[in-house]
Image: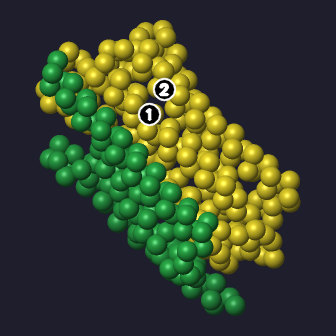
Chain colours: A yellow, B green
Amino acid sequence: MSARRHPGLSVAPGDAHTESEAEPVIFGFWVFLMSDVVLFALLFATYAAMRAQGIAGGPTPRAITDLAGAAIETALLLTSSFTFGMASLALKYRDDTRRLARWLAITGLLGIAFLGMEARDFATLIGHGAVPQRSGFLSAHFTLLGTHGLHVAAGLVWMAVMFARIAIAGVDDRVRLAIMRLALFWHMLDIVWVGIFTFVFLYGATG
Amino acid sequence: MIPEDDARRRELRAYAIGFAMAAALTGVAFAIVAGRMMGTGATLLSLGGLALVQVAVHFRYFLHIDLEKSHRDDLQLVLFTALIVAVMVGGSLWILWDQHARMM
């Protein structure tokens, strides 16, 4: 029973020993996440400046905004955040590895679908000659979205590693902690995406 | 098993509430733009506001940052990061716009 309770993602009472061991690990990961947020914030600042000052006669934000595509990508990523929440609950309250694996797999598939949509967006832009080297605005656009996409891809690789470790060793305490950190990472990427769909796609469509 | 089940149900509800709120906020934001409901200035302003609220919802319901004592360190870290982000983003924009104005 005690091995099933963990702090960090959401603290359950009891099991003071594991809690005190896990706490610095989770807090350290929070520090990493926040430094990652600073990175994204500066990419957003660059994007904001470039969308106003760096068009250079190339396509404008409005010209390259695909609102329907953005809506689908947003739905995929938001749903994947929720399904990871379900995986976290399966991890915390049930000793049911198959349930955990099922929710993680759904989350992973949603992530893959998201990346597929994003790759399609990039291919469309490049097909229309809207390549990163065309203007400062397009450089900033590809850098911001590309960095987020790379993070999602890294999350998917991490997820695959988790599957391998569960398959080999089962869900031990180290795997548990790793999945909790992956959950924080995944939810954080969704928060960054809130900024992207607002300031890139919705602002882009508004003009 | 009963208190454990209770806690599970409470957390499940929190995730569901978070998901519903986030979906509603996103839907409103997209509807404002797709339906051209307001002028440009008002649209940009309300979109920014909706994004801010949605970020808070994600932190509260998905990342479990709240005012409970056990989360105080995390909350302070998040708030400090928000301060750093505000200074760095605000400063960058200020400098870039000033420079742009001088080069015109």
Instruction: Specify few, some or many for label 1: CA neighbours under 10 Å numbering under 14, 14-19, or 20 or more.
Output: many
Query: Viewed as shown, does residue A134 lie left or right of B51?
Result: right
Residue at x-position 72% and y-position 44%: A119
Instruction: Determine the residue located farthest toward the top in the rendered image.
Output: A168
Mark 2 and mark 1 lie on one chain; the one further toward the N terminus is 1
- The amino acid beneath tag 2 is Leu
Q: Quadrant of residue A50?
A: bottom right
Query: Viewed as shown, does residue B22 lie left or right of B103?
Result: left
Residue A107: x and y in percent read 52, 32
Placement of the C terminus of chain A among the 4 image quadrants: bottom right
- The amino acid beneath tag 1 is Phe
Query: Viewed as shown, does residue A124 lie left or right of B17?
Result: right
Judging by the rendered image, the residue that carries numbered circle 2 is: A104
Which one is in front, A57 or A79? A79
Instruction: Specify few, some or many for label 2: CA neighbours under 10 Å numbering under 14, 14-19, or 20 or more.
Output: many
Circles 2 and 1: CB distance less than 8 Å?
A: yes
Residue A148: x and y in percent read 58, 49
Q: Which mark is residue A84?
A: 1
Q: Is residue A11 visible?
A: yes
Cα separation between marks 2 and 1:
6 Å
Residue at x-position 46% and y-position 51%: B23
Residue A123: x and y in percent read 79, 49
